Every structure is written in C-alpha cells, then in structure tokens.
Amino acid sequence: SLPPLHKDPFDRLLLAQALSEGITLVTGDAQLARYPGPVRKV
C-alpha cells in the first residue's frame, strides 16, 4: 500500500497504475511528486 502522502484517491490510483505498469508518472502536483519511484514533477 502507498504511504498517505497525498489525499486525492485518483492521484494515488494513477501512481499505483504507474508502479504496476513500470512507467513514469509525469505530474505538476508537488504532493504527488513526494512519492518515491517513477514520479517526475514538471
């Protein structure tokens, strides 16, 4: 399970899917970018 760094369930779903698929999630959301793993803030 993901640590509760971000409250938006849809963003957490996107991150979980990116982890599952082995792809990088590109976001402008600073809170979402705090997660370790395949997240890049633009």
Image: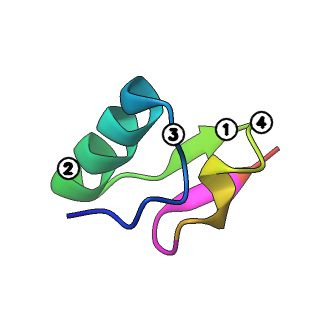
Q: Residue at x 54, y 59 (%)?
A: 5
* Residue receiving disc 4: 28
Three-letter amino acid code of the residue under disc 4? Gly
**Callout in the foreground (3, 4):** 3
* Residue receiving disc 2: 21
Quadrant in the picture for the N terminus: bottom left
Instruction: For label 2, count other residues whose C-alpha is less than 10 Å away and answer few (under 14), some (14-19) or many (20+).
Output: few
Closer to the chain start, of discs 2 and 3, is 3
Three-letter amino acid code of the residue under disc 1? Thr
Closer to the chain start, of discs 4 and 2, is 2
Q: CA distance from mark 4 to mark 2?
A: 20 Å
Of helix, strand and loop, which one carries label 4? loop
* Residue receiving disc 3: 7
Along the line of sight, which residue is nearer the eye, 37 or 22? 37
Q: Residue at x 24, y 42 (%)?
A: 17
Q: CA distance from mark 1 to mark 3?
A: 15 Å
Q: Are marks 1 and 3 in contact (CB under 8 Å)?
A: no
Instruction: For label 1, count other residues whose C-alpha is less than 10 Å away and answer few (under 14), some (14-19) or many (20+).
Output: some
**Callout in the foreground (1, 3):** 3
Q: Are marks 4 and 2 in contact (CB under 8 Å)?
A: no
Q: Residue at x 20, y 49 (%)?
A: 21
Residue stretch in magenta? 36-40
* Residue receiving disc 1: 27
